[in-house]
């Protein structure tokens, strides 16, 4: 089985490999200047972990197409070094020239992945990012139940767990199988509940910490997206990492996202971060399909009294203020927590529950936004819980 994500701390044994890679990269010339890419200072810090070398070439965004042959040549040059089994080189836009150390080796610097062209994924009709500006708002639970809701509506659906630091898909769906490796190092996704699944959680032990750097994250996400035999899907749901960092920006820029669904809880603190996530997608021209209010209200299972523990309606009001669709609200229900921990999502465990109805309502609103963008601007039916 191929290990998608090399992990563990880089030790001293990798340093001669990095030096050898730098020497090979001195033979790769930048066409406009005729100088090598190391001397020009466009090579980021080189990271070597378990035989995989990762680095980036920092260039002006308008030169992305012209520099693609240079990127390919850099990958090929690094692969000639003894001890390097595979390479990952990406083009990035930079804020300034690289700093150099005493050995003229590149140091890390501020950079952003170049948007470029978002290469389509054959056989996949639409890719939806489920995102949040912060953790702890139930994003992964919503993503899984949304995917199941879309499947229940007759769509062929897959879900990619892109949260490398904290993969939730294995626990939420009770799946702990290892993906089968097909020809050309392609992985076969796991089948569960009518969904096709892929997560780093299927490849590493649940208790094992992931210790790696930005280029390795980007490489891993690319592999899990493009080196998986997804087959023919109507929709691929991507459970994004929380926040708006490098991994999120890379996915938004390099993946042909059809749209994004923003998850928030009702209180102001969560909404502040939700705005950041929404703004990130808007800046990279990814349509926002709408906002979901999770943990919207709590009804006591004993007395039936309704309590808005985190407030209520904040996400709805925010969607109206920002001019994006409000997709629906999901109650704070202990059954969602219990079924999620048991690996049987609420929409499967109890299809007639209030929460399951809410998830199906959200799935219908998402489909309306995909099939007819004007429909998504109409408020969905609000689920009223009588206390």
Image (tube, grey):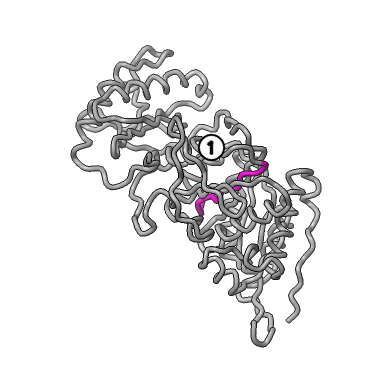
Q: Residue 29 in magenta?
A: no
The residue lying at 23 percent from left, 30 percent from top is 17
Label 1, residues with CA under 10 Å away: few <14, some 14-19, many ≥20: some
- On the image, the x and y values in percent for residue 199 come to 48, 49
Q: Position of residue 181 (x, y in %)?
A: 44, 39
Corner quadrant of residue 233: top right
- Quarter-wise, where is residue 327 in the image? bottom right
Q: Residue at x 34, y 42 (%)?
A: 6
Image position of 363 (left or right of 163) = right
At mark 1, the secondary structure is loop
Residue 312 x %, y %: 68, 71
Residue nearest the observer in this picture, 285 or 362: 362
Closest to the observer, 352 or 255: 352
Q: Quadrant of residue 156?
A: top right
Q: Position of residue 122 (x, y in %)?
A: 61, 32
Residue at which label 1 appears: 229
Please tell me whether residue 239 belongs to the stretch shown in magenta: yes
Looking at the rendering, the stretch of residues picked out in magenta corresponds to 234-244
Image quadrant occupied by the C terminus: bottom right
Q: Is residue 206 left or right of residue 117?
A: left
Q: Quadrant of the N terminus?
A: top left
């Amino acid at each position: 089985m191929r290990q998608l994500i090399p992990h563990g701390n880089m030790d001293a044994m990798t340093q001669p490999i990095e030096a050898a890679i730098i020497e090979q990269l001195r033979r790769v010339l930048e066409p406009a200047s005729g100088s090598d890419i190391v001397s020009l200072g466009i090579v980021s810090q080189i990271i070597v972990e378990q035989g995989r070398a990762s680095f980036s070439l920092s260039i002006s965004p308008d030169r992305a197409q012209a520099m693609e042959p240079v990127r390919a040549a850099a990958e090929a040059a690094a692969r000639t070094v003894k001890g390097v089994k595979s390479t990952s080189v990406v083009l990035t836009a930079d804020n300034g020239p690289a700093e150099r150390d005493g050995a003229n080796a590149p140091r890390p610097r501020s950079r952003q992945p170049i948007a470029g062209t978002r290469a389509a994924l054959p056989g996949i009709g639409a890719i939806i990012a489920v995102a949040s500006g912060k953790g702890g708002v139930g994003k992964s639970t919503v993503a899984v139940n949304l995917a199941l809701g879309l499947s229940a509506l007759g769509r062929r659906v897959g879900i990619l767990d892109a949260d490398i630091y904290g993969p939730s898909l294995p626990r939420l769906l009770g799946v702990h199988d290892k993906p089968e490796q097909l020809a050309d190092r392609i992985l076969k996704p796991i089948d569960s509940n009518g969904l096709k699944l892929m997560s780093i959680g299927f490849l590493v032990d649940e208790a094992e910490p992931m210790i790696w750097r930005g280029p390795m994250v980007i490489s891993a996400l690319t592999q899990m997206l493009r080196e998986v035999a997804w087959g023919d899907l109507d929709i691929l749901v991507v459970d994004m990492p929380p926040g708006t960092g490098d991994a999120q920006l890379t996915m938004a820029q390099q993946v042909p996202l059809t749209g994004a669904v923003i998850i928030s809880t009702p209180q102001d603190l969560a909404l502040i971060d939700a705005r950041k996530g929404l703004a990130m997608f808007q800046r990279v021209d990814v349509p926002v399909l709408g906002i979901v209010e999770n943990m919207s209200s709590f009804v006591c299972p004993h007395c039936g009294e309704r309590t808005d523990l985190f407030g209520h309606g904040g996400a709805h009001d925010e969607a109206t203020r920002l001019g994006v669709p409000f997709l629906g609200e999901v109650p704070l229900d202990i059954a969602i927590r219990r079924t999620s921990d048991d690996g049987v999502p609420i929409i499967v465990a109890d299809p007639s529950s209030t929460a399951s109805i809410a998830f199906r309502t959200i799935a219908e609103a998402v489909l309306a936004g995909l099939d007819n963008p004007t429909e998504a601007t109409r408020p969905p039916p609000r689920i009223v819980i009588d206390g």
